[in-house]
Image: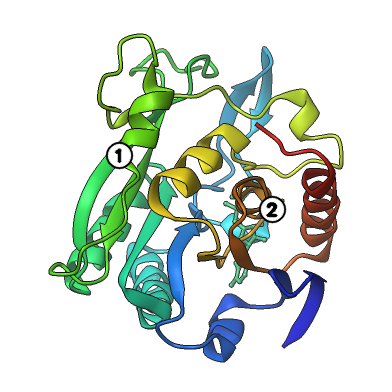
Amino acid sequence: MSLYYTHNNDIKLYKGDCFEILKTVDDESIDLIFSDPPYFLSNNGITCKSGRMESVNKADWDKTVSLDEMHNFNLRWISECKKKLKDNGTIFISGTYHNIYSIGFCLQQLGFKILNDIAWFKVNPPPNLSCRYFTHATETIIWAKKNPKAKHKFNYQAMRNINDPAVNKQMLSLWKITPPKKDEKTHGKHPTQKPIALLNRIVEASTNEGDLVLDPFLGSGTTAVACVNYGRKFIGIETDVNYLEIAKLRINDALNIKQF
Ligand SMILES: C[S@@+](CC[C@H](N)C(=O)[O-])C[C@H]1O[C@@H](n2cnc3c(N)ncnc32)[C@H](O)[C@@H]1O
């Protein structure tokens, strides 16, 4: 295990495989897990980015594997995460149609109670090149609780307030959030970076100040930045040192000026 970065022991980033590092995290210590695992969609296909044809391949960690391999992988990491959650803890997992059905089934197989399937509407998605089906414009984020009988945290009024203070209506499970802006990528690129607005909403909705949040597939550190913004403690795990470096720089920025 290797601690890559820490700030006051409240924010900790570990370099390594989450299956190894999760073993060192105390059982029943985590209030919230956000996870954005590999989608396994890198299959040498093509997509359109900024008007140009590009490979869909993200990286080696995202290479397509068989359905059984993907499902076993999801079952393994979600089982490990379940042990780490407090009894009233919850997990948000984001994914595309490539992996989200396996993830939903794993959560059901492992006894979680699904609270919501949130559709993140990306507002301005790249066009569909084949013109043979609808343009993909959403990602799904499943929110589930470890113990179906426990009272989980939900900051209902805070969500109502940010939904639209003028009309004061309940927050829907349809979230219209644009992809990360340029100023969220000043420290380098990650192929699947999530927008900070998305993680700010998740952290604010489901945790209180001082709570401990875990992200086993940290990437460029978006979850860590949201935790700094809202005064939550954080543990992040990532195999790639280049992404950890981006995460560290983003956290240092947020410690100076909160990012919304
Ligand atoms: C979909 S990305 C996460 C992106 C992140 N949400 C962000 O906003 O930047 C998944 C990340 O998991 C990392 N990863 C893949 N397998 C891993 C493993 N076994 N343990 C830890 N990290 C892993 C990859 O290097 C990649 O950065």
Mark 1 or 2, closer to the camera:
1
Up-down relation of residue 214 to residue 189 (above or below): below
The residue at which mark 1 appears reads as 156
- Name the quadrant containing residue 77: bottom left
Q: Nearer the viewer, residue 256 or 174?
A: 256
Q: Amino acid at mark 2?
A: Gly
The residue at which mark 2 appears reads as 221
Question: Residue 237 appears at what percent x and percent y?
Answer: 65, 70
Q: Does the CB distance between marks 1 and 2 fall below 8 Å? A: no
Q: Respond yes or no on whether mark 2 lies under 8 Å from ligand 1.
A: yes
At mark 2, the secondary structure is loop
| Quadrant of the rendering where the C terminus is positioned | top right
The residue located at (54%, 82%) in the rendering is: 22
Q: Is residue 74 left or right of residue 150?
A: right
Up-down relation of residue 228 to residue 108 (above or below): above
| Quadrant of the rendering where the N terminus is positioned | bottom right
The residue located at (25%, 26%) in the rendering is: 170
Question: Residue 176 appears at what percent x and percent y?
Answer: 43, 21
Q: Nearer the viewer, residue 74 or 148?
A: 148
Q: Amino acid at mark 1?
A: Tyr
The residue located at (31%, 56%) in the rendering is: 153
Instruction: Determine the residue located farthest toward the left in the rendered image.
Output: 149
> Ligand 1 quadrant?
bottom right
- Tell me if I can see residue 65 in this picture: no
Question: Residue 61 appears at what percent x and percent y?
Answer: 62, 61
